Image (cartoon, rainbow, N blue to C red):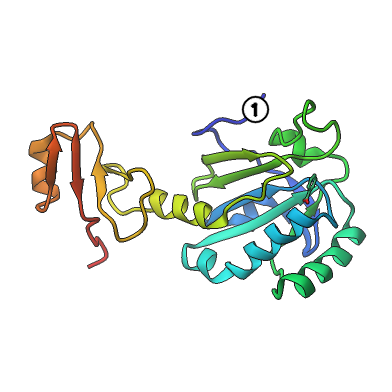
Amino acid sequence: MSLRLGDTAPNFKAKTTLGEIDFYDFLGDRWGVLFSHPADYTPVCTTELGRTALLKEEFDKRNVKVLAVSVDPLDKHYGWVNDINETQNCFVDFPIIADENREVATLYDMIHPNASATATVRSLFIIAPDKTVKLIITYPASTGRNFYEVLRVIDSLQLPSKHSLATPANWQPGEDAIVVPAVSTEDALKKFPSLKIVKPYLRYTPVPDENL
Ligand code: BEZ
């Protein structure tokens, strides 16, 4: 059965370019991004892994560990990583799973037979420190994902007061958030003194800095 938001991300053990891993041990108490791509030595995938490597600092800042999946074997991954580093001017330092027997791909429903019988599609999961699945996106093989959007979703998920706040369309860090409908306006005014009430159900507030 396919995974849904709020489900527990299943654990697994796998061979990767950085050695054998147990997924939960690899994540520890950090956030995770697990993403698949169709095949090694393919152009779109090369740019995606390169872009992810170039965003390392951004993922680190957000306490996120990144793990890629491909059904190709390890020896192929090693050669391809050299190509990615060379062509994308990066250093891929996150592991890439060699999922030759498709265990991870099956567990995470990354093979969509009507798209390709053998290759994984571009699935991406954001996993919270409690191991719940927070985001699932699926892109076709021909479209590279936008990793700034992945970071933006992580920023939204990591908002302080996250049980009271949501983020509007096209939100970017620094912009006002929205108070969720479950919070009454009376309570919202106590919690967020700069509340802007556009409609009783549409209430904006600057994101409070709860670290102060
Ligand atoms: C690519 O990564 O470039 C790619 C892979 C499979 C189909 C189309 C493009």
Give the residue type at disc 1: Ser
The residue under label 1 is 2
The image shows residue 157, relative to residue 199, as above or below, that is: below
Whole-percent x, y for residue 183 in the image: 19, 35
Does residue 48 show up?
yes
Q: How many numbered tags mark residues here?
A: 1
User: Outermost residue toward the right?
Assistant: 75
Apparent side of residue 190 relative to residue 49 in the rendered image (left or right): left
Looking at the rendering, which quadrant does residue 197 occupy? Answer: top left
- Location of the C terminus by quadrant is bottom left
Looking at the rendering, which quadrant does residue 1 occupy? Answer: top right
At a point 19% along the width and 32% down the height, the residue shown is: 201
Apparent side of residue 19 relative to residue 182 in the rendered image (left or right): right
Apparent side of residue 159 relative to residue 117 in the rendered image (left or right): left
Does residue 91 show up?
no
Whole-percent x, y for residue 172 in the image: 37, 56
Apparent side of residue 36 relative to residue 98 in the rendered image (left or right): left
At a point 67% along the width and 46% down the height, the residue shown is: 143
How would you rate the neighbour count of disc 1 (Cα within 10 Å): few for under 14, some for 14-19, many for 20 or more? few
Disc 1 element: loop
- In the image, 32 versus 135, the foreground residue is 135
- In the image, 187 versus 131, the foreground residue is 187
Whole-percent x, y for residue 51 in the image: 64, 64
At a point 77% along the width and 67% down the height, the residue shown is: 84
Looking at the rendering, which quadrant does residue 169 occupy? Answer: top left
Whole-percent x, y for residue 152 in the image: 45, 54
At a point 11% along the width and 40% down the height, the residue shown is: 187
User: Outermost residue toward the front?
Assistant: 142
Q: Is mark 1 within 8 Å of ligand 1?
A: no
